[in-house]
Image (cartoon, rainbow, N blue to C red):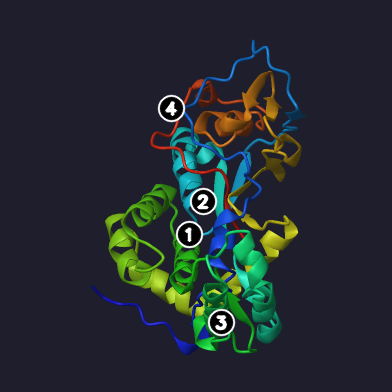
Amino acid sequence: MKKVKIPTSLKISTPIIIVTIILLLATSFYSGFTWSKLKNISPKSTLTATATFEAKKSQKPELQFFVMSFCPYGNQMESTLRPIFDLLKDKVNITPHYIFNKVTDLDTTCKNSSGDPTQCAAYVQNKYFTTIAECQKTITQNLSLCKDENNYIKSQDGTMYSSLHGRQEANEDVREICAWNQTTDKTQWWNFIGAVNQNCTAQNADSCWEDQAKSAGLDTTQITECFNKEGINLIEKEIALTNQYNVSASPTLFINDVAFPPESAEIQNGTLKIGDKIATQNQFSTPNVIKTALCASFQKTPTECKTVLNDTTGAAPAAGGCGN
């Protein structure tokens, strides 16, 4: 298998590592994110909504979703959005975006993000670590990795970039952006990321992605050329968007620039009114409910919106998301 060489101007990073266990315990915008079996939402529901999705109408609604290529919650969202794309095709724009970190002061960033060794007693008390020695060792390792400049995308002006789950996730984020920009048949892109999600990991993506792209019918030479020549500019554009929309967690969704679900729905046992229908919190991230919100954003609703999508199958993961 041909292995892509990364030029020195595009060294991709291990993330700015925060104490691993703390990261895994973090919750995100999708605090109610579950994958229980979908129950059809009904206009005749006796539930009282705690929030309303205020749809902004357009002829061709746009759904923007912000993820990291190996965030499991982001991958699950991609699986959720795939049948919506298959149903509505070019009647809507469903556009991926990726979350990166930008580092201008490495020493300060690493000190703030690697953990505080003076707090190890508290970390142990809160069961993040079993012993103070283990805590101190982990923080020392995190700090060392964080300060290694070879673990970052590095621009010519010295600015460094990273992605939460490591060097190869950042690689894959850029490749997936390149693939999206280069293909007019977005089905190929969805097939590509589906294959990557199924067959690759944040530990082997650099040696795994190429076969997945070829199987989806993508030009791997073009993706590599885009990666090498356009990587920094593409990352800067993504950072500008995440700042514009105040995004910090994967997955985060906007439909015609309206957050979905709205933050006001993210309370315990929250319910959401979408048009004349009401969805419960455990349905917010299911295909049929997101489709309902997207269809509510049309000026003229297409007939496809009458289709009821099947729920995503499989075991339900823990609620949460990947956050910076």
- First in residue order: circle 1 vs circle 3: 1
**In this orientation, does residue 256 appear?**
no
Q: Which residue is mark 2?
A: 74
Assign the C terminus to one quadrant of the image.
bottom right
Going by the numbered disc 2, the residue's amino acid type is Gly
**Is the residue 175 above or below the residue 296 in the image?**
below
**Is the residue 177 above or below the residue 48 in the image?**
below
The location of residue 207, given as percent across then percent down, is 31, 71
- First in residue order: circle 1 vs circle 4: 1
Secondary structure found at label 4:
loop
**Is the residue 226 above or below the residue 158 in the image?**
above
**In this orientation, does residue 156 appear?**
yes
Do the residues bearing badges 2 and 1 touch, measured as CB atoms within 8 Å?
yes
**Toward which corner of the image does residue 86 lie, by quadrant?**
top left
The location of residue 102, given as percent across then percent down, is 65, 74
- Rate crowding at label 3 as few (under 14), some (14 to 19) or many (20 or more) other CA atoms within 10 Å: some
Q: Give the left or right position of residue 6, taking residue 74 as reference.
A: left
Relative depth, front residue between 40 and 221:
40
Q: Which residue is mark 1?
A: 69
Going by the numbered disc 4, the residue's amino acid type is Asn
Relative depth, front residue between 251 and 133:
133
**Circle number at residue 310:** 4
Q: Marks 4/3: CA distance?
A: 47 Å
- First in residue order: circle 4 vs circle 3: 3
Q: Which residue is mark 3?
A: 140
Do the residues bearing badges 1 and 4 touch, measured as CB atoms within 8 Å?
no
